């Protein structure tokens, strides 16, 4: 699947980290900030974008996500 993909890292004030993949980084970060989707990031207030990489291939984004999660 071709297009633009982002693998990103979010952090909370207490330094809890979250790694994810998305096509629309701005929309996704806004979702985290507004806690519009219940789950880990809403529960732990993980909403600060600290790093992202961009690629044209979903497979590369997923590979990057797995590497970052270690």
Image: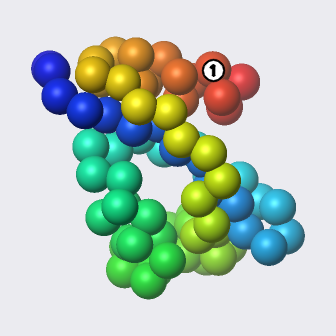
Residue 43 on image: x %, y %:
61, 76
**How many numbered marks, from 0 up?**
1
Of 36 and 55, which appears nearest the observer? 55
15 on left or right of 6: right
Residue 1 vs 8, above or below: the answer is: above
Q: For the view shown, which residue lies furthest in the right direction?
A: 14
Circle 1 sits on which residue?
Answer: 67
Residue 13 vs 22, above or below: the answer is: below
Q: Residue 68, located in which quarter of the rendered image?
A: top right
User: Which quadrant is home to the N terminus?
Assistant: top left
Q: Residue 26, located in which quarter of the rendered image?
A: bottom left
Q: What residue is shown at x 77% (from left), y 60% (from top)?
A: 16
Q: Categorize mark 1 by other alpha carbons within 10 Å: few (<14), some (14-19), many (20+).
A: few
Q: What residue is shown at x 25% (from left), y 32% (from top)?
A: 4
Q: What residue is shown at x 57% (from left), y 64% (from top)?
A: 40
63 on left or right of 48: left
Residue 5 vs 40, above or below: the answer is: above
Q: Residue 14, located in which quarter of the rendered image?
A: bottom right
Residue 56 on image: x %, y %:
27, 22
Figure coloring: rainbow
User: Which quadrant is home to the C terminus?
Assistant: top right
Can the viewer see residue 38?
no
Residue 50 on image: x %, y %:
66, 53
Residue 52 on image: x %, y %:
54, 41
Query: Which type of secondary structure does the marked residue at label 1 adopt?
Result: helix
16 on left or right of 48: right
Can the viewer see residue 29?
yes
């Amino acid at each position: 699947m071709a297009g633009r993909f982002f693998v990103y890292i979010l952090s909370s004030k207490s330094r809890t980290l979250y790694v994810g993949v998305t096509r629309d980084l701005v929309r996704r970060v806004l979702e985290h900030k507004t806690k519009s989707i219940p789950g880990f990031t809403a529960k732990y207030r993980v909403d600060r974008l600290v790093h992202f990489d961009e690629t044209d291939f979903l497979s590369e984004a997923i590979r990057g996500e797995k590497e970052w999660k270690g």
